[in-house]
Structures are given as structure tokens and as C-alpha cells.
Image (cartoon, grey):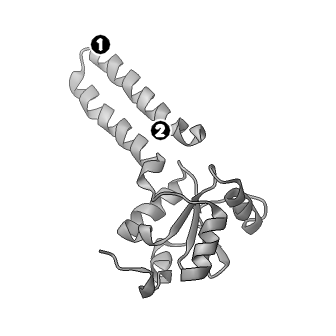
Amino acid sequence: MTRVWILPTLLVLCGSVVATGLILKGNPGTAAALLPAFLALAAVNSPLIFPASIGAREAQRRSVADGRPVVFWRPGCTYCIRLRIRLGRRARRLYWVNIWQDPAGAAAVRAANDGNETVPTVVVAGRPHTNPDPRWVREQLSPSAGSDA
């Protein structure tokens, strides 16, 4: 559980150290510009921007019942962040499984990717797709999966 927060925590700490050093050197303006950048990077790389994760077995059970795709992801993955941002509010219509929190999810990803934990891996109708185009993922969302509102 704590592994997901290592990168965001390091970014906040590094940003704080850099900002403190700049302030001590008499550059508060530069510090004021850099610290928010580090904080934004920490936020984007944290699990906070992703919908709540559920277990792989539960996600697969729900997916069979309603046809929604399952996304296997991990914090800090730039491709996962890209997918999440490009999906926008539609991201809530998918089931998200954090492979760092769910060993069954990590095993499912390894099974789909020749033993590698390559994410994002999106499972649609039981078939895994590694790092698919976000546009394609949006097309897989059925109208019955809910509205964007």
C-alpha cells in the first residue's frame, strides 16, 4: 500500500528542498514557481486522480455482468496517466484495478503480457489489450454503461 505513495512523496520532498534552497539563496519568486510544479507532478503520479480501485476478481465479475472494460494500472505509469486523463469523466465507467494493491490483478496482467506487468492493460469482453489508444477505449464503452453526466 505504501509503495504507491513513494513517487508522490519523493516529488513533494524534492520540491520542498529545492524551494527552501532557492528561498535561502534569495530567489523566492523562482521557489514560488517551482514548488507548485513539483506538487502538480506529485498529484498526477498519485493514485488520487484514478477512480477507486477494486480487486481483479470483483472487477472481472462485474465486467461479465455489465460489459464494462477492466483497466489494470499502477501509480506512476505515464501511459496509465495518459489513458486516465484522455478518458476524462468516462473513466468512472470502467473498473480500475491497481496491480500494486491486488496480487490477482498483477497475475492477470502477467498472464496477458508474457510474464511482464505491462500497464495499462484493458480487458474488454475477456480479451486483454495492452496500452490501447484512449480513443479505442472510449469506443468500447457501451451506451448501457451509463452517461457522461
**Image height check: is 56 above or below 137?**
above
Residue positioned 48% across, 33% down in the render: 9
User: Quarter holding the N terminus?
Assistant: top right
Q: In which image quadrant can residue 31 be found? A: top left
- Tell me the amino acid under the disc marked 1: Leu
Disc 2 from disc 1: Cα separation: 24 Å
- Tell me the amino acid under the disc marked 2: Pro
Q: In which image quadrant can residue 73 be found? A: bottom right
Query: Which tag, 2 or 1, sits closer to the chain's start?
Result: 2
Q: Residue furthest top?
A: 24
Place of residue 90 in the rendered image (x, y in percent of width and height, measured from the top left): 40, 71
In the drawing, what numbered circle is on residue 41?
Answer: none
Q: Secondary structure at mark 2?
A: helix
In the drawing, what numbered circle is on residue 8?
Answer: 2
User: Quarter holding the C terminus?
Assistant: bottom left
The reply to whether residue 97 is visible in this rendering is: yes
Residue positioned 62% across, 60% down in the render: 55
Q: Residues within 10 Å of mark 1 (few under 14, many from 20)?
A: few
Q: Residue furthest bottom?
A: 143
Place of residue 53 in the rendered image (x, y in percent of width and height, measured from the top left): 53, 58
Place of residue 141 in the rendered image (x, y in percent of width and height, measured from the top left): 47, 81
Select label 2 or label 1 by which is in front: 2
Q: Nearer the viewer, residue 134 or 73?
A: 73
Residue assigned mark 1: 24
- Position of 92 with respect to 3 (left or right) is left
Q: Nearer the viewer, residue 47 or 144?
A: 144
**Image height check: is 44 above or below 87?**
above
